[in-house]
Image (tube, grey):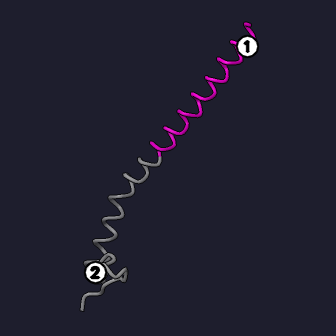
């Protein structure tokens, strides 16, 4: 009986570790996206201001200022 309870505890503990790994992976991915957003906006502003290239429009093509 003790052996069965011990195995059940180990199994539940392993599931808990897997669950926390998923949460931490998602959290780290979110931090990377948030950290890169500011640089991405700077690059979009650069393209728009210096090169006249704006982000994609409704047609999915890149517009150019004339």
**Crowding at mark 1 (Cα within 10 Å: few <14, some 14-19, many 20+):** few
Residue 8 inside the magenta-drawn segment = yes
Q: Where 61 falls versus 15 (above or below)?
A: below
**Crowding at mark 2 (Cα within 10 Å: few <14, some 14-19, many 20+):** few
The magenta segment: 1-28
Q: Quadrant of the N terminus?
A: top right
Q: Where 29 falls versus 46 (above or below)?
A: above
Task: Tell me which residue sits at (37%, 52%) in the image.
Answer: 34
Q: Position of residue 55 (x, y in %)?
A: 32, 75
The image's mark for residue 4 is: 1
Task: Tell me which residue sits at (66%, 24%) in the image.
Answer: 11
Task: Tell me which residue sits at (34%, 77%) in the image.
Answer: 56
Query: In this rendering, would 8 be left or right of 28?
Result: right
Task: Tell me which residue sits at (70%, 13%) in the image.
Answer: 6
Q: Main secondary structure of the magenta part?
A: helix
Residue 17 inside the magenta-drawn segment = yes
Q: Position of residue 64 (x, y in %)?
A: 29, 87
Query: In this rendering, would 14 be left or right of 23?
Result: right
| Secondary structure at numbered mark 2 | helix
Viewer-nearest residue: 32 or 18 = 18
| Secondary structure at numbered mark 1 | helix
Please give the residue where the numbered disc 2 appears in the rendered image.
50
Kindly give the residue lying farthest to the top in the view shown. Answer: 2
């Amino acid at each position: 009986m003790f052996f069965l309870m011990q195995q059940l505890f180990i199994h539940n503990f392993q599931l808990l570790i897997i669950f926390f790994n998923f949460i931490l992976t998602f959290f780290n991915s979110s931090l990377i996206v948030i950290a890169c957003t500011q640089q991405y906006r700077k690059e979009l502003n650069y393209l728009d201001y210096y090169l006249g290239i704006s982000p994609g429009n409704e047609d999915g093509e890149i517009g150019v200022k004339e």
